[in-house]
Each structure stands twice: as structure tokens, then as C-alpha cells.
Image (spheres, rainbow, N blue to C red):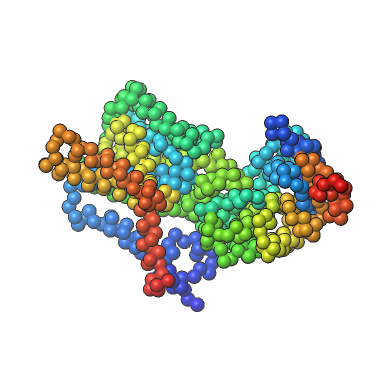
Amino acid sequence: MNKLTVSDVTLTFGGLNALTSVNMTIEPGLITSIIGPNGAGKTSMLNCVSGFYHPTSGEIHYGEHRLTHSSPHEISILGIARAFQNLELFRGLSVLDNLLLARHKHLDYSFLSAFFYTPKTSRIEAENRAFVEDIIDFMELEPYRKQLVGNLSYGVQKRVEVARALTLGPELLLLDEPMAGMNIEEKEDIVRFIMDIKQERNTTVVLVEHDLGVVMDISDQIYVLDFGELIGSGTPEAVSKNERVIEAYIGEE
Amino acid sequence: MATNRWLATGNFFTTYKEEQRIFLTNIDRLCLWLLIAALYAWPFFVETSNKGMLVLDNILIAMVAILGLNLVTGFAGLISIGHAAFVGVGAYTTALIASGLGTDHVFLTHAWPLVIIISGLVGAVFGGIVGLPALRLKHLYLAIATLSFQMIFQWVINFSKLFNQGQTMSVGRVFWLTGKIGRKDHYLFWYFAVLTIVVISGFLVRNLLRTRYGRCLVAVRDNDRAADAMGMHPGFTKVYAFALAGFFAGIAGSLHCYLYRGAGIESFTLHQSISYLAMAIVGGLGTLSGSFFGPAAIRLLDLGVENLSSWATNFLPSTMNIATALRPLTFGLVIVLFLMFEPRGIANWWRIIKSYFKLWPFKY
């Protein structure tokens, strides 16, 4: 597995700095959280890594690959998947089809064999269908398999969002506030899924989240952003004692 | 437990390959094959006039064109106002082959399936070129880009010598196993030929829709940001959608050219493009069965209103031209009514009927 390095990334919108010289190293196999108050640049950071934004200056590397100017579909092939904060699901399709779409790059049959639905196509489709079923099982989405995503409740949609990112078969999973707007039970479910993703599926997780309790409990490493600047990093204990972090969250005395 | 392949109830899948099947039950499959067989068989038992046959031929050709339009507008969600121009590209490809080689050249009259496929491919190339703005443009802006292609197409055809300035360019009669297809059998022969092509392309599109090449179309329609994150290039997927639409349009155009034994600009105007869109909407955007219902409904409606208006001239004063106005009036009215009351088209009625039978013999 590869290491994600963000070096000296600055992102500017007009005169506003969304990110200012941010450095991060995401170690493989760990859960790394990015936290910070509203507007701190957490989602901008994820957008830079997943290719939706390109940094104004600085570099992003994933192992040997330079991601700085790559587009999202190129990055997704490298094994970096992303779940969106505001649900970006294919609303008119069933859960199953949503997940199958994420297998797009893994279905390596040609256009003509798809046109005539050759045995090869059928076999590859069935294999990937089995993979999707594995994810459905993992994320406990069985009751919703054939339902339209648009008709599902918010909590379940969030789960489908995570499941779809997972279906890409990533090494690095970027989760953008997977627990926003959920009740306690649903949050506990998602936390359990994130722990399982790390342990059972051997996937590196980058988590952007507002719920500090959850973040402190499950993270191996935390980066704290405020107004686009990195104000602290390290283990949960170290971060919770960091004075600049306390200042950003609670305010000065 | 043995599963029952004949009814939807109690029909469980045990492997993923079973889930890929086109037909849920054997009854579904049987019904479709019977329908197709009936469509092939009836001309042998019922005497039909050439005019009646021509109407059917037209419906079938429109079905091929709508299959393409439905892929780009229904499934990929990109409004194409230039579909008649793509059909025209196919027709003029065939016509150019005719004027280049001679109207009765062997290639044209004997290898006509090849000519049809070549026309389809040329249509696909033009579709791809016209789709290029989709790399940057979205929604209405893209629709305007396709409209501009329609305009350019009409202008080019009308003003260049090569295309006989929009006047008819003729194509010779084709040969089949039985020899040359004469005037008497012409429409009947093309009925069978086009029906075959409709059946084949219907199955091909159905295949496409259950693979990644079909799913990616729906992905860019529903959410192209997410499609991007899922590893599809949204721009190229749209260009590909246009190419696909162009392919089927090209085939339809070539068939049109053979059927009318020539190509003239009046069949590929903006008016025709709008009426293709109407067929797609009335049939049901984003459904495969809609591609078959739509053309049939609009063409038959057109015919019915035409008969009605010629009958109405018997007692309506001819000076007011009410009878002639009836046709565009009903056409517009039907589209508006469908958009208001059944935006999912006739295919939705079909879905409702089917879901009723699905649970049979149980109530729920």
C-alpha cells in the first residue's frame, strides 16, 4: 500500500486562501482524521486529493504517482475512493446498480462483446456482481438491494455512499463526514463499519468528521485545520492537549 | 426447492448468471417471441396495400432512430435537437455511395446490409464529432449545439452540388435471394428487412444496457460528478452516447434512403427532429420499450388525424382551413398532455400492466 503525501499545498479561490501551505502524510493502514471548525478547509483538502480541485501550488503524491493535476477518474483508478458529504448518489437507480457502477473500471470486456453479451461478458458481470454482493453483505444493505436510492432514508443513503466508495476496491478511502446528520445508533453503525474497513478490508481511511468524540476514539492520527492552516497534528492524546487546537475549538480565555 | 421459471412468483435466483437474464419468466420470453413471430407471419395471411405497408415501414424505421435518440436523450440525459440530421447523415451516405458508384452498382444493390452498416458507422462518426461540445457544455447549451448541427446540415445539403442541392438523389432497387425486388414487393420486402433490424438492434441495446457501456450512460445523466469519482470520464461518456445515437440514426437513415429509393432534404429537417423528440417523450424517455411505443403511437395518430381531417373537409368550410390545422394541433396537444399527465410515457402504462400480471395469481 502507498503513502499519501501532501506537501505545501495552497488552494486559492480569488483572494481567499482555502488552504495555506498544508503538509500531511497519510500512513497506510491507519485511520487518519482531519478535523477543524466550519470552513476550515477540510472538504477542500479532500477535493484536492480526489482531483475535484487542483492546488494552486504545492504537490500531492500517492506513492510514486503525482496527483496534483490528475482528474477524479484518473485518481479513482489508482485506488483512491471517495464518499461525498452531500449525497452524490445516482438517485434514479437501485442500490445494486449504484454499486455496480462503481465496478466500471473492473469490467474489462470490450464494447463489442457487451453489444452481443458474449459468455466472457456474462462471466465478468457475474464475478463483479458477486463482489458487489460481498460489499452489500459487509455494509448490511441486504434489505435495500433492489430499492431506488432516491426512496431510501438519509441514514441508509449515507451508508450506500460509503458502500459505493468501497465497491471501487480502494486502498485509500476518503470519507467526507459520513456521520453528519445521523442519530446515535446510526453513528455507532458507521463507526463499526469504519473500524471493519480498516481491519478486515485492510484499507487506509481518511475521515473528515465533526463529532470529536468519535474522532478521538477511532483515529490513529489527527490533523487539525483552521482557516486553511494546519494548526496541529499527531495522536488523539497529543492533539487534545495542543493549545492552538483548544483555542480554535473553545476560544481563548 | 425447484424454482418455477414460468411465473414471477416463486421464481428465485440461485446464481448471479440467472439474474442477468433478459426475461424474468419464461412467459415473458414466450410472449415476445410469439409477438415477433406474428409480426413476421401476418403479411402472408392478410392482403395489405402498398400504402399501408409504407406506413408500417416508416414506423419501423422511426423505431431504429428512436432507439438511438433514447440512448442519448433518455438514458444519458443529453437533449439532442439534431437527430433528424444524424438520420440524414446516414441517408446521404447511402445516396453518396449511389451517386459515386452508380445507382445500380452491385455493391449498392447486393451488399445492401453492408451499405446500411457503413451508413451507421458514418452516422456514429458524425455523432461523435457533434458530441464533442459535451466535453464542456451542459444542458440547454449542449442542446443548442446539436441544434446548430441540424442547421449546418440543412445548409450544406441545400447549397452543395454534391448533394444535388437537397433535391432527391436516387438509389436503385436491391436484390435478394429471389432476385430483384420489384415495385410490387418493394414495401413488403423492406417491412421484413427493417423488422429484422429492429429486432436485432432492440436486443443489442438491451444487452448494452445491462453492461457497463449502458450503465455509464445513466451515471452521467444522474450525477456526472459522482460518475467522475467512479472512474468514468464524464465528457467522453457523453461523446460516446452521441456516437451511439448517431449509429442507430445512420442505420435508420440508410433504410429510409433505400425505402424511398432516394434521399431528399425534406425528410431530415428540424421539424422531423422535433417529431423524433416527441416520439421519444410519448414513448417514454429512458425506457427501451418506449422506443417502440413512441414511433408507433405518433405515426398512427398522425395517420388517424389525417383521415379525420380529410373526412372533416366534407362539412367544414374549406376557407377556414380548420381541417388542415387539425394535424399540427393534435400533435402539439398530445405532447403537452403527455408532459403534463404521463411524463414517463406509454412505457409506464406498459409497466403498470406488467406489474399487475407479475404477482398473479396472488393479489399482493
In the shown orientation, is residue B313 left or right of residue B357?
left
Q: Residue at x 50, y 63 (%)?
A: B19
In the figure, is residue B50 to the left or right of A33?
left
**Is residue B161 visible in the rendered structure shown here?**
yes
Residue lying at the far front of the rendered structure: A253
**Direction bottom: furthest residue:** B1
Left/right placement of residue A208 relative to residue A164 reads right
Residue B61 visible from this viewpoint: no
How many badges with numbers are in the image?
A: 0
The percent position of residue B233, horizontal first and vertical second, equals 58, 42
A233 or A132, which lies in front? Answer: A233
Q: Quadrant of residue B32?
A: bottom left
Task: Name the image quarter holding residue B119.
Answer: top left
Name the residue: 36% across, 57% down.
B349
Identify which residue is drawn at 18% across, 35% down.
B321
Give above or below for B4 relative to A199.
Answer: below
Coordinates of residue B30 in the picture (x, y in percent): 36, 64
- Closer-to-camera residue (B124/B100): B124
Rendering coords of residue A2 (x, y %):
77, 49
Residue at horizontal 69 percent and vertical 50 percent from the top: A176
In this view, B33 is above or below A106: below
Residue B360 spot, x, y in % from top left? 38, 71
Q: Quadrant of residue A191?
A: bottom right
Above or below, A248 against A183 in this view is: above
